[in-house]
């Protein structure tokens, strides 16, 4: 039971970290790259884009096994290439499904890829899918090991408080969003 609680805490922690990093990524793109100015890029009020959190968990659950395998063609490891392709396919599917869920629940989705070549209904496009593939590689090979280290090295009480505070903030945000929807 204690291990299950720890696992749930860890996955919630990962969800929140990637949701917040996704929000930062979106804001940086909007403010510094596209120069559109600041707007809250999430559906909720807090600094998180939950689609990134859900996408990260899906990648962790679906690609962790592949990531650990040593698949070679001759002497060349192709595991990272297969992981990259998996990330692109999964994140594109998550983004497409997420756009439909957002449209159903809020009447719109938060992005428009019609300006990109090879897009589908402005919901998904090749350019962002490749960027998500690159970002997913950074997340799986660099950030996830760091977050796992934080979740195991942080003192249990401090980790419980951190996850508890994040959970309360997130639940309040979801409730506030639901009331004001």
Image: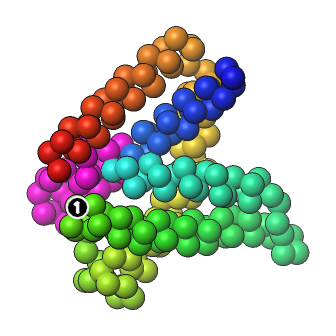
Q: Residue furthest right?
A: 74
Locate the N terminus by quadrant: top right
Q: Residue furthest left?
A: 37
Residue 87 drawn in magenta? no
Please give the residue where the numbered disc 1 appears in the rendered image. 106
Scheme by which the image is coloured: rainbow
Counting from the top left corner in percent of width and height, residue 114 is at 26, 83
User: Where is 13 relative to 118, above or below?
Assistant: above
Residue appearing at x 33%, y 33% in the figure:
171
Counting from the top left corner in percent of width and height, residue 54 is at 47, 52
User: Where is 178 relative to 112, above or below?
Assistant: above
Counting from the top left corner in percent of width and height, residue 134 is at 50, 64
Q: Is residue 44 visible?
A: yes
Q: Is residue 173 left or right of residue 131?
A: left
* Residues in magenta, as a range: 20-48
Q: Is residue 32 visible?
A: no
Residue appearing at x 27%, y 61% in the figure:
105
Secondary element at tag 1 = helix
* Residue 150 in which image quadrant: top right
Along the line of sight, which residue is nearer the eye, 3 or 113? 3
Residue 33 drawn in magenta? yes
Q: Residue furthest front?
A: 179
* Residue 162 in which image quadrant: top left
Counting from the top left corner in percent of width and height, residue 166 is at 38, 28
Q: Is residue 178 left or right of residue 35?
A: right
Q: Is residue 174 left or right of residue 176?
A: right
Along the line of sight, which residue is nearer the eye, 137 or 56? 56
């Amino acid at each position: 039971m204690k291990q299950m609680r720890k696992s749930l805490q860890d996955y919630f922690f990962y969800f929140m970290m990637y949701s917040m990093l996704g929000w930062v990524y979106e804001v940086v793109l909007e403010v510094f790259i596209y120069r559109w100015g600041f707007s809250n890029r999430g559906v909720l009020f807090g600094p998180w884009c939950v689609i990134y959190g859900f996408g990260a968990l899906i990648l962790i659950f679906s690609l962790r096994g592949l990531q650990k395998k040593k698949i070679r063609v001759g002497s060349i490891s192709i595991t990272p290439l297969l992981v990259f392709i998996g990330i692109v396919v999964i994140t594109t599917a998550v983004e497409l499904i997420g756009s439909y869920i957002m449209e159903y629940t809020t009447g719109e989705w938060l992005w428009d890829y019609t300006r990109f070549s090879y897009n589908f209904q402005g919901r998904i496009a090749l350019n962002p899918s490749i960027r998500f593939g690159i970002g997913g590689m950074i997340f799986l090979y660099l950030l996830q090991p760091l977050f796992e280290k934080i979740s195991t090295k942080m003192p249990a009480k401090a980790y419980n408080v951190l996850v508890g505070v994040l959970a309360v903030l997130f639940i309040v945000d979801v409730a506030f969003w639901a009331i004001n929807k």
